[in-house]
Image: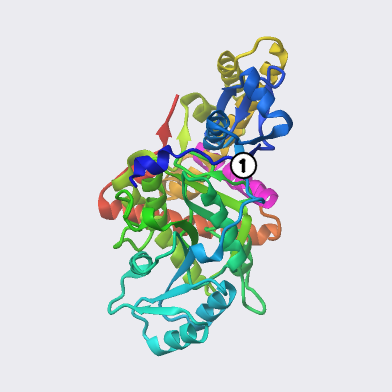
Amino acid sequence: MTVADVVARSLPDGFVVRLRDDLLTADRGRVLVGGSPVRVVRLSPQARRLLAGGRLEVDGPATAALAARLLDGNLAEPVLDRIDAPPADLTVVVPVRDRPDQLDRCLAALAPLPVIVVDDASHDPAAVAEVARRHGAALLPLARNRGPAGARNAGLARVRTPLVAFVDSDVEADSGALLDLARHCADPRVALAGPRVVGFARSERPRWFERYDAVASSLDLGRVGGQVRPGAAIGWLPSACLVGRTALLNGDIGDIGGFEDDWRVAEDVDLVWRLVDAGHVVRYDPSVEVRHDVRPTLRGWLGRKLVYGTGGADLAARHGDKVAPAVLSLPMALGAAAVLQRRWWSAPVAAAVTASAARALRRHLPAEDDTADTTRVAVRLAGRGLWWAVRQESALLLRHWWPAAALAAPFSRPVRRALLTAVLVDLACFLHERPGVDPGTALLARRLDDLAYGAGLWWGALTRRDPRCLRARRVR
C-alpha cells in the first residue's frame, strides 16, 4: 500500500461528525464561518439537509466527502463513542534514561497493553531492567545514548501491531486514554493523534513555579481540539504522548521514517509537519488527558524552556516560514500596534482597522437573503482578528523579541508603553484562560518562562546564523 492509497481512502460508513460549537453562521444557516485558519463554507441545500441537527453520518461517497471537508477545515469534529479500538492493535513504546520511579508509575498505568521499554543507555540499567521486568514489559537496551527521538525509533522498529503509542517515562497515561486516541484511526486518513498533556506537581508542597507549570505546562495545548497543521490553532503535538499508525511511522508506507533520529528537541513538531506535508491528518483531542510530571527545580524548569526555544532554528532550516512566531496582515498589525500604545488615537485607529476589515470580509461572505446577519458575522470576525493581532504582538514583544525590546526600551517611550500594555494583556488572558494561579505568581512565572524560551530562540538563531525563526510572516 502506498501513501496515495492511504490518503485516497474515504471515511467509512457509520463514521459520525458534528459541527463545532464555536462556528458562526450567516445567511440563515446557509454559510458556515469558523475553523482554523478561518474559512467560509457555503452549504448546498442537500448539505443543509444532511447536517440537520448539526450531525452527519457517513453513508456513501457524498457524505464521506462532506464530512472530510468539514473535518479538514476544523468546522466539525469526529464523534467516536461508537468506535471500538481493540487493545491487541496497540503497542506502547516508552523511552527512558534512568528515572526508575517515574518509569514504575508510567508502566503501572499502561497495563494491560504490551509495552517496549527502550533503555537509552541509563547510568543504572539494572534499576530500569528491574522495573520493566516487574511490569512484564519487553526491554530494549541501547549501547549508546541516542536521545528520546532515537530511542523511540529503536522501539518502533520492534512494534508489530497496526498502531503504536509513544509515552515518555515522566507521563502517566492509562491504557483507556491511549485506546481513546486510537479510535481516531477509524478515520483512515489519520496518521497521528495526541491528547491534552497537563502538568502535575508531585511535591508535597509545590513551589510557585511548580504550581504555575501544573496549570500552564508548555506541553498543554488547551481545551480546544481539532486538526493539527501549521497555521491552525494547534500547529504541533508534543511527543510526550502520541498514538499513530505503525506502518506510516516506521517507513513501511511512504518515506516519513519516524522521528528525526539526531534531534534532541522539536522532533515532535518536525514529525507532525512532515506528516501534514505528505498529505496525512494529525488530530488533537483534549477530551483525553494524560499527566506529565513538572520539573521539581527552578533550574530544571527554566533550562527546559530554554532548550525548547533552541529548536526554532532547526525547524526554520527545514520548514521555512512555517515556524514564524506570528502571522499578521499589515492593517491588523497597525491596528494592534495602536492598541498597545494606549494613546488618545488608539481607539479611532483600531475602529477604522476593524471597520475596513469587516467591509473586506463582508464582500467574501456570500448572502442571498439576510445581509444584516452577514454584516454581523463580518464585524465579529474583524474584531476577533484585531484581538488576535494584539495577542500576537504582545507575545512577540514579551517572548520572541524580548532581547531587542529590552535594548530599545530605555531609549523609547513608545516601546516602554507597548511592553507595559503587552504585560497587562498577557496576564489578563492567562488568568482568564488558565485559572488556578494567583496573579503575582502568574506575572513572575510568565515573564521567566518567556525570557528563557526567547533566549533559547535567539541562541538557536545566532548559532545557526539564520534569523527566520524570529521573523513574523505577513499575509494579506
Q: Is most of the magenta stretch helix, strand or loop?
A: helix
The answer to whether residue 472 is left or right of residue 295 is left
Task: Give how far across and how far down residue 221 sits, in percent.
Answer: 56, 52
Q: Quadrant of residue 141?
A: bottom left
Q: Which residue is mark 1?
A: 14
The amino acid marked with disc number 1 is: Gly
What colouring style does the render use?
Answer: rainbow
Q: Secondary structure at mark 1?
A: loop
The answer to whether residue 231 is left or right of residue 459 is right
Task: Give how far across and how far down residue 331 sits, in percent.
Answer: 50, 24
| 432 or 228: nearer the viewer | 228
User: Per the image, is 15 magenta?
Assistant: no
| 105 or 445: nearer the viewer | 105
The residue located at (68%, 57%) in the rendering is 439
| Quadrant (top left/top right/bottom left/bottom right) for the C terminus | top left
CA neighbours of label 1 inside 10 A, class few (<14), some (14 to 19), many (20+): some
The residue located at (43%, 74%) in the rendering is 116
Q: Residue furthest right?
A: 53
The residue located at (40%, 77%) in the rendering is 97
In this rendering, is residue 369 above or below 163?
Answer: above
Task: Give how far across and how far down residue 349 sits, in percent.
Answer: 59, 23
Please state the extent of the stretch shown in magenta in the rendering: 413-433
Q: Quadrant of residue 279?
A: top left
In this rendering, is residue 460 above or below 345?
Answer: below
**Is any atom of residue 197 visible in this view?**
no
* Figure label count: 1
| 433 or 236: nearer the viewer | 236
Task: Give how far across and how far down residue 89 sits, in percent.
Answer: 50, 62
Q: Residue furthest top?
A: 368
**Is any atom of residue 396 visible in this view?**
yes
